[in-house]
Image (cartoon, rainbow, N blue to C red):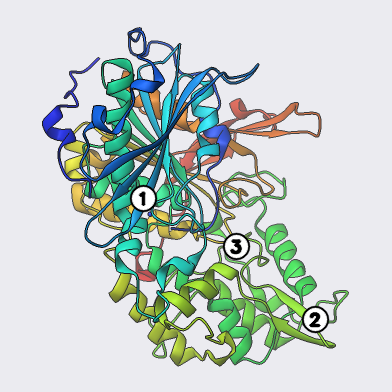
């Protein structure tokens, strides 16, 4: 075990000064038994009633409630602490929840992230608690979990709360949680981990960038790294259909998705399984769909133009790249929804995007998305990056301080993610490599793509398992993961397929006549890399 910097009183006295995306934390990433060989046995805990505001002595931090929960057949008895952290004189408040097992603590701290506009929740701490972790989460200053926190009643931006949500609230949580852990057990955590997906993934990377000593390991799934670009870019398909006056019927989108997967099914993995193994290597011609019959009419050239623009991604008036589009094999539903109203098809944007543009950018709760044009979209896109890039974006590629601290970060992303294009995560990973060098980056940062997997899980592909356990093993034993495991289960919960997930840029490919349902039948080969020209 490497030497550790203890959590000192001077560190705790440092003023607490930290999150966004679409999706929720995938609980199974922290639900397996903790790896063997962890920290030594913890001392007997103090009583819950000892965890008072005076005992913690944290600046601008109040203990609101302490509950001794008796536990049940699946969850151990625990001490559950709720705290409030403020930042005078603004008056904003961040809620922090800390759950402490009363026996069997494994000596580790696990911070759990949120999803969408929700900074986190106490419910998300139960899997970590069941596995012996002291765990914490925060609302990041936004208890409602919607995007309405951005705008005050007078239509001015609520910057203190935006900053809480962007980065400050999560750091507040980490400082408070470590103080609570030390007060309760008599010593701080031997190792500290971050576990999150979507907003939670972004939160973890923001911590690594701004507060590199907060965590030893960061698991970031489907991270909303370039938040302003992603959140604005999610509206692109609706803008295209609006400007082209062609809201494409859902069954046409479904037909296009099915045809794309069929055409590229064997790309990458060499297996016909309804999943594109290497989406970056798929070059299906959408133009071949013109005239294809569907239950809602033949696919027209106009329909294909909409699909092509959605796949290409947001572009400026001069054709310049703004952000990544929909990768082959990704469902159109979710962001490009269309509904019938009075016999006419009309677009139905994703609610998060309406909050984002209407409140964060237009600063108008009555903003009408139907007024959007290509030019207006481009203006909003530029505004979003300029205003929020450093507050909500977690795209700083210089992770040298985190690496120097000995931190490890494991990124994973579903390659059929409808909401957060996986290309953005690849882009960030490659920018870290360009900044620090491939060799150094490989020592502390790895990226795994999951073919056919949706946002933080779901989809047609085998689901990733054991990501968090792989991170712990890497941090504590130096075993850098070369592959992760993915599994498909049937309705009875029986594993019917396993598949390796290879570290980018490699992809899993079937060897010879091996069993396609057995991970042992695959080897990792070099896949298609993201085109630099796209950036």
Q: Which of labels 3 and 1 is toward the front?
A: 1
Q: Label 3, on which residue?
A: 328
Crowding at label 3, few (<14), some or many (≥20) Cα neighbours within 10 Å? Answer: many
Of labels 3 and 1, earlier in sequence is 1
426 in relation to 221, above or below? below
What secondary structure is marked by label 3? loop
Of labels 1 and 2, earlier in sequence is 1
Q: Along the line of sight, which residue is nearer the eye, 247 or 91?
A: 91
Residue 221 drawn at (x, y percent): 47, 45
Q: Residue at x 25, y 27 (%)?
A: 55
Give the CA separation, mark 2 to mark 3: 27 Å
500 in relation to 269, above or below? above
Crowding at label 2, few (<14), some or many (≥20) Cα neighbours within 10 Å? Answer: few
In the drawing, what numbered circle is on residue 535?
A: none
Residue 248 drawn at (x, y percent): 72, 80
User: Which image quadrant: the C terminus?
Assistant: bottom left
In the drawing, what numbered circle is on residue 94?
A: 1
385 in relation to 87, above or below? below
């Amino acid at each position: 075990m490497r030497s550790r910097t203890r959590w000192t009183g001077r560190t705790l006295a440092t003023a607490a000064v930290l999150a966004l995306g679409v999706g929720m934390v995938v609980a199974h990433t922290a639900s397996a038994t903790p790896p063997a060989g962890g920290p030594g046995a913890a001392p007997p805990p103090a009583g819950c009633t000892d965890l008072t505001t005076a005992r913690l002595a944290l600046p601008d931090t109040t203990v609101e409630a302490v509950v001794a929960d008796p536990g049940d057949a699946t969850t151990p008895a625990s001490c559950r602490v709720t705290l409030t952290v403020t930042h005078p004189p603004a008056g904003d408040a961040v809620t922090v929840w800390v759950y402490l097992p009363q026996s069997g603590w494994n000596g580790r701290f696990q911070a759990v992230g949120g999803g969408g506009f929700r900074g986190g929740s106490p419910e998300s701490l139960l899997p970590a608690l069941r596995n012996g972790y002291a765990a914490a989460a925060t609302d990041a200053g936004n208890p409602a979990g919607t995007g309405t926190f951005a705008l005050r009643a007078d239509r001015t931006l609520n910057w203190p709360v935006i900053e809480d949500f962007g980065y400050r609230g999560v750091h507040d949580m980490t400082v408070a949680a470590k103080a609570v852990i030390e007060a309760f057990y008599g010593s701080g955590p031997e190792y500290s981990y971050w576990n999150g997906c979507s907003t939670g993934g972004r939160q973890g990377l923001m911590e690594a960038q701004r507060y590199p000593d907060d965590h030893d390991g960061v698991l970031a799934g489907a991270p909303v790294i370039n938040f302003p670009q992603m959140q604005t870019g999610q509206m692109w398909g609706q803008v295209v259909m609006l400007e082209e006056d062609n809201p494409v019927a859902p069954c046409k989108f479904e037909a296009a998705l099915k045809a794309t997967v069929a055409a590229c099914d064997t790309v990458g993995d060499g297996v016909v399984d309804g999943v594109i193994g290497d989406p970056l290597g798929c070059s299906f011609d959408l133009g071949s769909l013109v005239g294809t019959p569907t239950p809602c009419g033949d696919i027209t050239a106009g329909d294909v133009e909409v699909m092509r623009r959605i796949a290409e991604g947001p572009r400026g008036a001069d054709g310049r790249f703004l952000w990544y589009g929909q990768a082959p094999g990704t469902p159109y539903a979710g962001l490009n929804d269309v509904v019938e109203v009075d016999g006419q098809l009309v677009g139905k944007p994703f609610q998060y995007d309406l909050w984002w543009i209407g409140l964060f950018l237009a600063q108008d709760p009555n903003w009408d998305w139907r007024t959007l044009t290509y030019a207006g979209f481009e203006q909003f896109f530029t505004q979003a990056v300029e205003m929020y890039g450093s507050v909500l974006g977690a795209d700083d590629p210089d992770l040298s301080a985190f690496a120097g601290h000995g931190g490890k970060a494991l990124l994973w992303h579903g390659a059929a993610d409808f909401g957060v294009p996986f290309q953005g995560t690849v882009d960030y990973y490659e920018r870290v490599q360009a900044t620090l060098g491939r060799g150094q980056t490989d020592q502390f940062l790895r990226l795994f793509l999951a073919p056919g997997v949706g946002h933080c899980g779901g989809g047609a592909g085998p689901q990733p398992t054991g990501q968090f356990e792989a991170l712990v093993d890497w941090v504590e034993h130096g075993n850098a993961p070369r592959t992760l495991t993915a599994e498909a289960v049937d309705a009875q919960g029986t594993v019917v397929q396993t598949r390796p997930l290879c570290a980018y840029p490699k992809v899993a490919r079937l060897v010879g006549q091996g069993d396609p349902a057995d991970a042992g039948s695959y080897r990792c080969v070099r896949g298609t890399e993201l085109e630099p020209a796209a950036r």
